[in-house]
Image: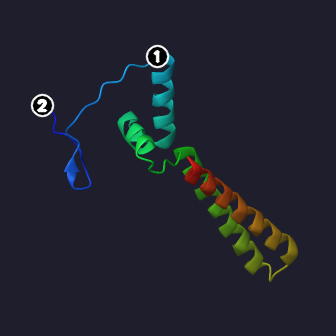
Amino acid sequence: MMPFEVRGHFPLDAIVNVRLTTDEKDRLKEDAALAGMSVSELVRRRYFGRPIVAHADIVMIRELRRLGGLLKHLYTSSNGEHAQETLATLHALKAAIEAISRDHQKN
C-alpha cells in the first residue's frame, strides 16, 4: 500500500469519492494539468479557497519579467536613448504582470 502524502503537519489520510460526468472529469484533469498539479490538489485548493496559479500564467509572468530585464539592459546600454518609449513599455509590462496576478487572486 502506498503511503498517503503529507500536507503541512497532517497526512492526507481520507478519501472522498465524487461522481462526475466524463466531461466534468476531463475538465478537472485539464485544469489540473494547466495548473501543474494533481486533480486532488486542485480540488482541495478550490474548495478551501487557496490560490491556484495556472502553469501557463506562471510561464507568461516569467517571460514578461525577462522581457522587462532585456528592455532595461537595452536602455542602460544605449545611454537612455528612447527613454520615454522605454519607460512606457516597462510600465505596460508591469501592468500586464499585475493584471495576470490579480486574476489569480480572484480565482
* Residue ID for mark 2: 1
Residue at x-position 49% and y-position 42%: 35
Judge whether 2 appears above or below 7 on screen.
above
**Going by the image, does 7 lie left or right of 78?**
left
Judge whether 78 appears above or below 92 on screen.
below
Residue at x-position 42% and y-position 41%: 47
Q: Secondary structure at mark 1?
A: loop
Q: Mark 2 or mark 1: name the one nearer the start of the chain.
A: 2
Residue at x-position 74% and y-position 80%: 76
Indicate the amino acid at tag 2: Met
Badge 1: how crowded within 10 Å, few (<14), some, or many (20+)?
A: few
Would you say residue 82 is visible in this rendering? no
Q: Quadrant of residue 84?
A: bottom right
Residue at x-position 68% and y-position 62%: 67
Frontmost of labels 2 and 1 is 1
Q: Secondary structure at mark 2?
A: loop
Judge whether 26 appears above or below 66 on screen.
above
Q: CA distance from mark 2 to mark 1?
A: 29 Å
For the residue pair 85 and 49, the one nearer the viewer reads as 49
Considering every residue shown, the one lying at the far front of the view is: 48
The disc at residue 21 is: 1
Q: Position of residue 59 (x, y in %)?
A: 57, 51
Q: Position of residue 64 (x, y in %)?
A: 66, 59
